[in-house]
Image: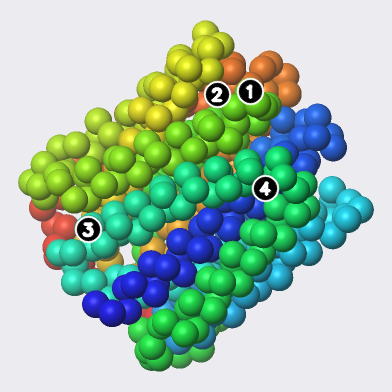
Amino acid sequence: MPQFAPLFASSAAQTMGTTVSGLALGTLVYAATGSPLLSALSMFGSSFAQVIGATALMSAADRLPPRAALTVLAAALGLGTAVLAIPGLPVWALFVVLLGLGLVTSLGGGVRQGLLSELLPERAYVLGRSVLNASVGVTQICGFALGGLLLAALSPRGTLLAAAALALAAALISWVGLGPRPPRASGRPSISATWRVNVRLWSSAPRRYVFLALWVPNGLIVGCEALFVPYAPGHAALLFALAAAGMLAGDVVVGRFVPARWRERLAAPLRLLLAVPYLVFFLHPAPVLAAVAVTVASAGYAAGLMLQERLVALTPPDVRGQALGLNSSAMMTMQGAGAALAGALAQHTSPAVAMSVMAAASVIVTLCLAPGLRSDPARQELASEPVSC
């Protein structure tokens, strides 16, 4: 699959740029304001704009030529990140730019994941998705390490310029490496088309449970991660890198070595693993114990592979780009909401208490959703259900 390599490379470059810019923004805003809430929102607040992309723009994920769309969107992300590096940019203006970048990211995720589902046969989706997730883990580890080095050698604004260059590199890779490919669906992108398909996607109870399981527990735990900077300012980059390493390990093991017949059984324990280790933060653990908890918990993100595999099986091919884009955008929106909620709790308690509360909430949501995620014998019948556009 020659098209998979440039898709992989462009995704890796863009992810590294986003990782570097997030660390730089969190450091810049926390140094300027001393606010855990604003620091968390600077790293994850752009996710709020993704709900606009999911509800208004996502029909474009299946109706635009993938190469052109990925190139233009990555270039826009790079230019927007460069704007964030302008000296003297007010905090409110920074957040306005971040919301615009969230719209760009939401549509890019739908196009990329839709193209992936088109390139790979359904039986290979989990493996292909795990490879992309593994690249996210590796590039996040490298990105946080690079971000820490750049912050020490340059400044937060200089680090943002480096992140912008990485996004522009992703645009170049997409244009040069990907071949021309027609859209998966006909018709013009529109708000009404987006809404019609979203309503149909949400109307299926099995899909609805999968969506909620992908969005809510994950978002609550990202709220914990959003407090790494105020919890341990001197070790935040290390904690972020270890979280990425744990996610990488989980994705590699589940995607490459766990047989399909075992994946369904491991899904529920992995969803709980994502949250339970964070409960130790109620005891205000030392950096070493905190690092162990973060690493172990992040392996639980691999549950998303099984949930995405089920989502693909439940969704007709001509709208999988929109379904996967809706999932990606709503998941990012919930991550932004989790960061905001965790930051608000930390303002009134402490980062450690807020992290443990968010973890407990994630456990409760996971247990409540478990009955609806049991194997559904009608699953394959639903997969062939037509979705009118």
Please tell me whether mark 1 sits on a helix, a strand or a loop: helix
Q: Are the two marked residues, 4 and 3, in contact with CB atoms closer than 8 angstroms? A: no
- What residue did someone put label 1 on? 231
Q: In the rendering, which numbered label is found on residue 127?
A: 3
What is the distance, in whole Å, between disc 4 and disc 3 at their CAs? 33 Å
Q: Amino acid at mark 2?
A: Met
Residue sitting nearer the eye, 137 or 57: 137
Q: Secondary structure at mark 3?
A: helix
Tell me where residue 10 appears, x and y as whole percent: 46, 69
Q: Which mark is residue 150?
A: 4
Q: Nearer the viewer, mark 4 or mark 2?
A: 4
Q: Measured along the vertical axis of the image, is residue 231 above or below residue 168?
A: above
Earlier-in-chain disc, 2 versus 1 = 1
Q: Specify whether 183 is left or right of 74.
A: left
User: x, y (%) of residue 361?
Assistant: 47, 26
Q: Is residue 279 left or right of residue 29?
A: left
Dot label at residue 355? 2
Residue 348: % across, % down: 72, 19
Count of numbered labels shown in the rendering: 4
In primary-sequence order, the first of circles 1 and 4 is 4
Residue that appears at 67% across and 47% down: 150
Labels 1 and 3: the sequence-earlier one: 3
Q: Secondary structure at mark 2?
A: helix
- Label 4: few (<14), some or many (≥20) within 10 Å? some
